[in-house]
Amino acid sequence: MLQKVLIANRGEIAVRIVRACHDLGIQCVVAFSEADRNSLAVRLADEAVCIGPATPGRSYLHPPALISAALITGCDSVHPGYGFLSENPYFAEACAECNLIFIGPSPESMRLMGDKAIGRQTMSAAGVPIIPGSEGELSSLDEAVEVARSIGYPVLLKPSGGGGGRGMRVAQDESELQRAFPTARAEAEGAFGRGDLILERYLPHVRHVEIQVLADSHGHSIHLGERDCSAQRRHQKIVEEAPSPVVDEALRARMGESALRGVQAINYVNAGTLEFLMDPDGHFYFIEMNTRIQVEHPVTESVTGLDLVKWQLRIASGERLTLEQKDVRIRGHAIECRINAEDPERDFLPATGEVEVYLPPGGPGVRVDSHLYSGYMPPGSYDSLIAKIITWGDTRDEALDRMRRALTECVITGKIKTTIPFQLAMIDDPAFRSGNISIHYVADFLREWKEREATVSIA
Ligand code: ADP
């Protein structure tokens, strides 16, 4: 088993990793930036090392600082969390060169899946269904036009090296594609340092359904069912659930088998997620693989009873997965609300500030993953996620009712604003309750909600 882990991350995921280490009796060291000196992870970890200033490029995104922190504190491994360097193959390689175990897949798997063009080709070759589109990266606008003609409009241009839902552009026809292509290329170049684009058929009424996998270093892999992340704002997930309201056992088995074919094709090791879009007829198409733990992993933990972060640590230690596919049971229903320090009434503008009182919800079926405490000042330099509230119930309705209770109970006072009022309204919206939504649902509901809020404030 690993002896001592460096946590190369911050916020709630750093706290989550500290907890998994302590549950397994492993020591952990948190690497923190100057802005995170007072963070909860620093308080809870066994040791903490300052790795540089607030600017991520000089701390959480700076491999030499992280690796030095691991070596001087005698760590044998590094957990990258999500975001930052978690999907960076060079960082994984640098860790290996310094005899540090990178808690994640091999750099080769990360390279294959870090590039959407190569990812599509690899998965298609493994028999995983993909969305009709370009073979690889587009070499020119002419090629884009040619591919679009053969697959039909509307089409979507995507940065091949992109992430976080950024830089995608829809084109309804050829003239829009001609206009969108140079802009998309420049945007991708600016955001990701490379302008490569792929083109896919734009699927109109789809859901986002993803499969969680676990694979050990002895060639054994299993899937843990799906998460439905159709509730997205600007391609960013805000509410996730497991199981999906539209996936039955037979479809789950088919998606799981597909995902495992992909896993085996790239000799994947550790926890990972294959993301799919699903049309109203239940056809599913691979969009990308995340080679790390995901923000929404707790909903899978809640319905399977498995601790994914503990499994990440055990797999990285070389342990065998002791579970067979038949041992994985999905029990009840779980929902997660991502609570962000944003003002939903002002177009979700970041709205951080000192937290005067923090009183998390509790009671049956409620879990909170957060790095907040009363008196804490979340730094403005990082992403705005401040808490994840996860509720479980025997049925979807029970999980949603518990979510209403939990969101209502949750106290976060001070200058900080949160997305709770919006999420409270959303979980009681009849369309969301019915489960019959697509990736466009949040945009539609948001419009309605804003009108309603405006009416209330005039009254
Ligand atoms: P990123 O890596 O930037 O997150 P993804 O490929 O994972 O990009 O897509 C993010 C989201 O964008 C999806 O969850 C979905 O809502 C939307 N999306 C992606 N591809 C398509 C497509 N071909 N048609 C319709 N929507 C899409």
Image (cartoon, grey):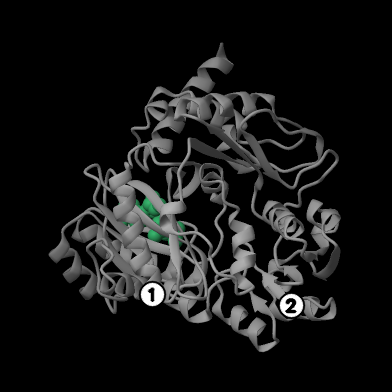
Question: Which percent across, then down, holds residue 232?
Answer: 45, 44
| CA neighbours of label 2 inside 10 A, class few (<14), some (14 to 19), many (20+) | some
Could you tell me if residue 31 is visible in this image?
A: no
Q: CA distance from mark 1 to mark 2?
A: 37 Å
Closest to the observer: 257 or 386?
257
Question: Which percent across, then down, holds residue 457?
Answer: 58, 17
| Residue 200 falls in image quadrant | bottom left
The residue lying at 83 percent from left, 38 percent from top is 374
On screen, residue 167 versus residue 103, left or right, reads: left
Could you tell me if residue 312 is visible in this image?
A: yes
The residue lying at 48 percent from left, 39 percent from top is 331
The residue lying at 38 percent from left, 48 percent from top is 208
On screen, residue 152 versus residue 209, left or right, reads: left
Question: Which percent across, then down, holds residue 304?
Answer: 51, 46
Question: Which percent across, then down, holds residue 177?
Answer: 26, 62
On screen, residue 388 versus residue 65, left or right, reads: left
Closest to the observer: 107 or 188?
107
| Residue 302 falls in image quadrant | top right
Q: Earlier in the sequence, mark 1 or mark 2?
A: 2
Identify residue for label 1: 196
Identify residue for label 2: 76
Q: Secondary structure at mark 2?
A: loop
Ligand 1 positioned in quadrant: bottom left
Looking at the rendered structure, the kind of residue marked 1 is Asp
